[in-house]
Image (tube, rainbow, N blue to C red):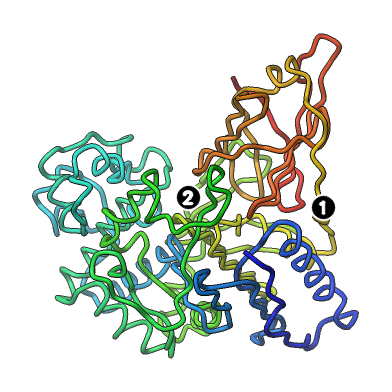
Amino acid sequence: MRILLPLLFLPLWGWTQRNAPLDRIDSFLQAEVLYRQFNGNVLIANKGKVVYQKSFGYRHLDPELPLDSLSVFEVASISKQFTAGAILQLAEQGKLTLNDSLRKYFPSLPYGVTIRQMLTHTSGLPHYEDLMEEKWDWKKVANNDSVIRYLALYKPPMEFPAGRDWSYNNTAYVLLASIVERVSRMSYDQYMMKNVFSRLGMNHTRIFNTRRWKGDTIANYAYGYVWSDSLERYLLPDSLPEYRRVYYLDAIVGDAGVNSTAGDLFIWVQSLKNHSLLKEKSIQLMTSPLVVQDTSAKRNYYYGLGQFVTHNELGKRVYHSGSWPGYKNNLAWYPERDLVVIVLCNNNFWADGLAASLENILAGRMPVMPEPLTETEEVDDRLLSAYAGVYEYRFEGFRDRLTLTKKDGRLVMDPRRGGRWTLRATGQNQFCYDVGQDLKLVFVVNVDGEVVHGDVYWVGVRADLRRIN
């Protein structure tokens, strides 16, 4: 993937110290493109005005077609806030309540959970992805009705009793989209187009989940690519067996399915700020810290309705990421500052980390700049064995794990969020991955060859690595 120069730069309006923060952001992004192959669109808005908008790279690789401000991305789980918005619309109209039971709409399902619990990820519902992976015919395309039918047929157990815990749950949002259909007597895509996208003037947004099984196309579509270590090139995930779910789960909506541009997502955030689609009470409920997501972190992180909520140096942060093979996205809104940061990536670059780095720059903290990497000599085999293991880290609002294994004299990393990356050794204690990622691991070992401490630098921001196995 060759580097394409940015297509659009909008000057800063009303920012202190002239354009200094945006100049730093631009330098950082240019380096991420040059040295780490970032490919995607970035939009930053301040006080209701877009102050920075650029496109980097391509929306299609063969033939090479450049991204631009109107390129349409699969936003994946960012879709959840739109599903939550549809539920709140129907609640405002008196057509449902958040205390309604799932069984009111789907009596065949054996789960006594409420709409509110589904919205806040406290339902404990079983994960439909596991069920469909085990039971579904992968040669067929499943939709929401397929999920409901299989949940009723196989009755997989709850993860925990409803309301007792928090666990991110796609099943809940699939069922919420189906409730929208039952109540409105419209398909999910028809409802969203009529009552959300068209009303707000989001003219480049739609539910698009028919490319693979119907062969449909839309204008200026940004195809999502994944890197193949073995073939050393970017490919559509459709061609790789490990990503077969992109086909057989393609027609499921509610937890994902929205395709949009950075500009249209900004319109959506403006509607939340101005209460132009939902009433102020509904917006407050959506963006309030209703349930604790992680009490073990130094700061508590919360979930509202279709939105994560936390605080950092810039104030209250309302955000959601979206991940699907080929796509990584992040939409963050700081309502107290009226600041919006949107990152859409179509080559699996970690948008959450990139967005966090941009926000750090806006807060006055410069992340570590990416630079060219040179692979070192062969690493001592005993050190490789010492580094292998399972590690936990906390990064900008969430806790996650990664696994390191030794293979053919190299370290291989398996992030829990997907992928398998062969790391480059840039020192006896330092390892990097620079294909569509900005990742660096640094270890400190004692005289006995045991790992004393580890750091992970993801998109220039440091986090502690804690070994758990």
Quarter occupied by the C terminus: top right
Label 2 belongs to which residue?
291
Type of amino acid under label 2: Val
Q: Position of residue 460 (x, y in %)?
A: 77, 52
How many labels were placed on the picture?
2
Height in image: 231 above or below 210? Answer: above
Q: Quadrant of the N terminus?
A: bottom right
The amino acid at mark 1 is Pro
Neighbours of disc 2 within 10 Å: few (<14), some (14-19), many (20+): many
Q: Which residue is mark 1?
A: 372
Q: Quadrant of residue 410?
A: top right
Answer whether residue 463 is visible to the viewer in this image.
Answer: no
Tell me which corner region of the image, top left, top right, bottom left or bottom right, holds residue 413.
Answer: top right
Image vertical order of residue 102 relative to residue 161, above or below = below
The furthest residue to the top: 448
Image coordinates for residue 237, horizontal then vertical, percent? 42, 55
Disc 1, disc 2: CB below 8 Å? Answer: no
265 or 53: nearer the viewer: 53
Tell me what residue is drawn at x 19 percent, y 39 percent.
135
Q: Earlier in the sequence, mark 1 or mark 2?
A: 2
Badge 1: how crowded within 10 Å, few (<14), some, or many (20+)?
A: few
Q: Residue at x 37, y 56 (%)?
A: 238
In the image, 119 versus 36, the foreground residue is 36
Q: Is residue 149 visible?
A: yes
